[in-house]
Image (cartoon, rainbow, N blue to C red):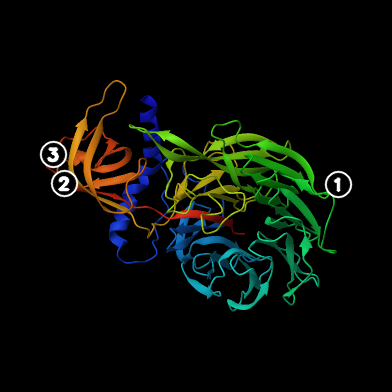
């Protein structure tokens, strides 16, 4: 039972501090239907490093039927400078080359949201044909933006000056990723399209939006990235094969490489000249050299177990690298079961593995969130308790349960790594260099919470409270008799705010430790037994961050 008390304390420490602010803001604004703009809450502890002067943009989903949000985070203070409203089920975001505009693909309502980060709350909405289901937005230039439409097998071209769709280009079935040659001004400028529903990579000539000859790779594709010199496009397919495409001939170079079946994400570090490939099925990170020093287009360097033999295994989802090329950071999560006063509840733990580029090894594992309750019904779109599928299905859940990006940095500011956490409903901040007496690669508890959600919260009517004293092995608890008045039902691990009870010791922010027939129990040393008092319990969710992108 000591482990029970510890698990509940972990949850309370990580989440209860923000529930009070959440409730107060929710009571003030629930009925107005506006986009919430909470000031970022810093978890008590080490203050943020004020030396960095850059920004990152985060995108949060708001259930499957409500509009989501985007937030501009100031790296200097890890604060939220403002929230914007997106469309329904935002899936991906990108900045144009100069960072002056942000575009967000909204899968749920066939729209793209545009915003100038200098004015973080003002947006324009770009409509797409019905059934487009946009899932990826990309640009390596400042004049045009490209949107992969999963539902219609097209790529929409948006003029970044007018925010108008100029054309839609037919490509393969179910496009899921785009990679544009980054060298602008070339007469051979092309965009490559990874198609999850076909075995060939589509090629678009961006100067006139014409379709070139497709590049066969032999299997459905899941990701694509471009080398900074525009000479190579790297495509990852569903079998785990990595193909290097020569952009002059639009042919696959031999030999190909493999990260194993189930690999589904690639990150290209231009500074280190590395490809990092995550495999959530094998729980591995594969590292490849792309310098072609040995005439091999993609040379395997190492395959690392990011789970470090943990059980259940950690699932890698996203990778970023810091600007000096010295380290990469892999965000992973563990689906497990956490103990409660009675039984257990589904929960998720998150961590970031630090990769030493010089040795191609894991130099440190940074725990981030612990014992975060999982929405087992997947109403938040984070994925529930199911492991990630080999091929992503946009309608089921987010592509990135964890998304990570590194801020800018250099001689006058240090790099930071931001981790958007869908289940934890916040963005965690890692200082990659020593700061505030902490060593490099420290997570000091600094998080930026997501905006409040418009998704239905939980409301209960409480009719009585029963206090149980602590023993040498168990904490004191309060059991509340309740009737559900709104929402789909309480779950063990949820944070609930109890108010209106006559005995004030029964009021407060608690984590549900057990559920019975018409009762929920919390760890509460101040509770008072009273069979004739009433109150309310509220669970007000935040939105779920699903993607983060770094500004210049």
According to the image, label 1 marks what residue? 293
Name the disc covering residue 240, or none. Answer: none
According to the image, label 2 marks what residue? 534
Check disc 1 and report its element: helix, strand or loop: loop
Quadrant for the N terminus in the image: top left
User: Would residue 362 be found to the left or right of residue 290 on screen?
Assistant: left
Q: Nearer the viewer, mark 3 or mark 1?
A: 3
Say whether residue 434 is visible.
Answer: no
Say whether residue 99 is visible.
Answer: yes
**Which residue is most to the left?**
532
Residue 159 is situated, as x and y percent measured from the top left of the image, at 63, 76
**Which residue is most to the right?**
295
Check disc 3 and report its element: helix, strand or loop: loop
Up the image or down, 427 lies above or below 169; here it is above
Residue 325 is situated, as x and y percent measured from the top left of the image, at 70, 46
User: Would residue 22 be found to the left or right of residue 173 on screen?
Assistant: left
Residue in the foreground of this view, choosing between 53 and 177? 177
Residue at horizontal 68 percent and vertical 72 percent from the top:
170
According to the image, label 3 marks what residue? 531
Up the image or down, 144 lies above or below 240; here it is below
User: Would residue 473 be found to the left or right of residue 223 on screen?
Assistant: left
User: Would residue 68 be found to the left or right of residue 26 on screen?
Assistant: right
Residue 206 is situated, as x and y percent measured from the top left of the image, at 73, 72
């Amino acid at each position: 039972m000591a482990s029970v008390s510890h698990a509940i304390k972990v949850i309370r420490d990580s989440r209860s501090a923000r529930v009070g602010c959440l409730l107060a803001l929710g009571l003030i604004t629930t009925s107005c239907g506006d986009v919430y703009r909470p000031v970022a809450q810093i978890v008590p502890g080490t203050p943020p490093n004020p030396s960095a002067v850059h920004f990152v943009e985060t995108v949060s989903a708001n259930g499957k039927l409500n509009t989501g949000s985007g937030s501009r985070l100031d790296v200097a203070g890890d604060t939220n400078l403002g929230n914007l409203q997106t469309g329904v089920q935002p899936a991906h975001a990108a900045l144009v080359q100069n960072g002056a505009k942000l575009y967000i693909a909204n899968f749920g309502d066939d729209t793209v949201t545009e915003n100038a980060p200098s004015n973080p709350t003002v947006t324009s909405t770009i409509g797409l044909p019905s059934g487009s289901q946009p899932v990826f937005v990309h640009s390596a230039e400042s004049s045009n933006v490209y949107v992969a439409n999963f539902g219609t097998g097209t790529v929409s071209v948006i003029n970044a000056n007018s925010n108008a769709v100029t054309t839609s280009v037919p490509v393969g079935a179910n496009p899921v990723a785009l990679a544009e040659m980054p060298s602008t001004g070339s007469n051979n400028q092309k965009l490559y399209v990874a198609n999850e529903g076909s075995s060939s990579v589509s090629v678009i000539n961006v100067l006139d939006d014409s379709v070139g000859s497709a590049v066969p790779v032999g299997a459905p594709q899941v990701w694509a990235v471009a080398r900074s010199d525009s000479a190579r496009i790297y495509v990852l397919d569903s079998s785990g094969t990595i193909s290097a495409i020569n952009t002059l001939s639009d042919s696959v170079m031999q030999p190909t490489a493999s990260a194993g079946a189930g690999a589904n994400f690639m990150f290209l570090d231009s500074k280190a000249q590395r490809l990092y490939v995550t495999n959530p099925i094998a729980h591995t990170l594969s590292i490849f050299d792309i310098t072609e020093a040995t005439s091999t287009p993609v040379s395997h360097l190492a395959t690392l177990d990011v789970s470090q033999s943990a059980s259940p295994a950690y699932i890698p989802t996203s990778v970023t690298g810091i600007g000096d090329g010295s380290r990469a950071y892999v965000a992973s999560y563990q689906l497990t079961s956490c103990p409660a006063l009675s039984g257990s509840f589904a929960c998720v733990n998150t961590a970031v593995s630090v990769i030493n580029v010089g040795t191609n090894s894991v130099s440190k594992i940074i725990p981030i969130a612990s014992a975060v309750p999982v929405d087992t019904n997947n109403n938040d779109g984070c994925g529930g308790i199911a492991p990630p599928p080999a091929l992503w299905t946009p309608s089921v859940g987010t592509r990135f349960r964890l998304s990570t990006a590194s801020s800018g940095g250099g001689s006058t500011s240090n790099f930071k790594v931001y981790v958007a956490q869908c289940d934890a409903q916040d963005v965690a901040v890692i200082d990659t260099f020593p700061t505030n007496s902490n060593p490099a690669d420290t997570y000091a508890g600094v998080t930026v919470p997501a905006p409040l959600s418009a998704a239905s919260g939980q409301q209960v009517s409480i009719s009585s409270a029963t206090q149980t004293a602590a023993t040498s092995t168990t904490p004191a608890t309060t059991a509340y008799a309740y009737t559900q008045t709104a929402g789909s039902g309480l779950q063990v691990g949820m944070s609930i705010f109890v108010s209106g009870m006559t005995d004030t010791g029964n009021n407060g922010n608690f984590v549900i430790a057990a559920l019975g027939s018409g009762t929920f129990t919390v760890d509460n040393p101040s509770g008072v037994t009273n069979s004739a008092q009433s109150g309310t319990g509220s669970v007000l969710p935040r939105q779920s961050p699903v993607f983060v992108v770094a500004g210049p």
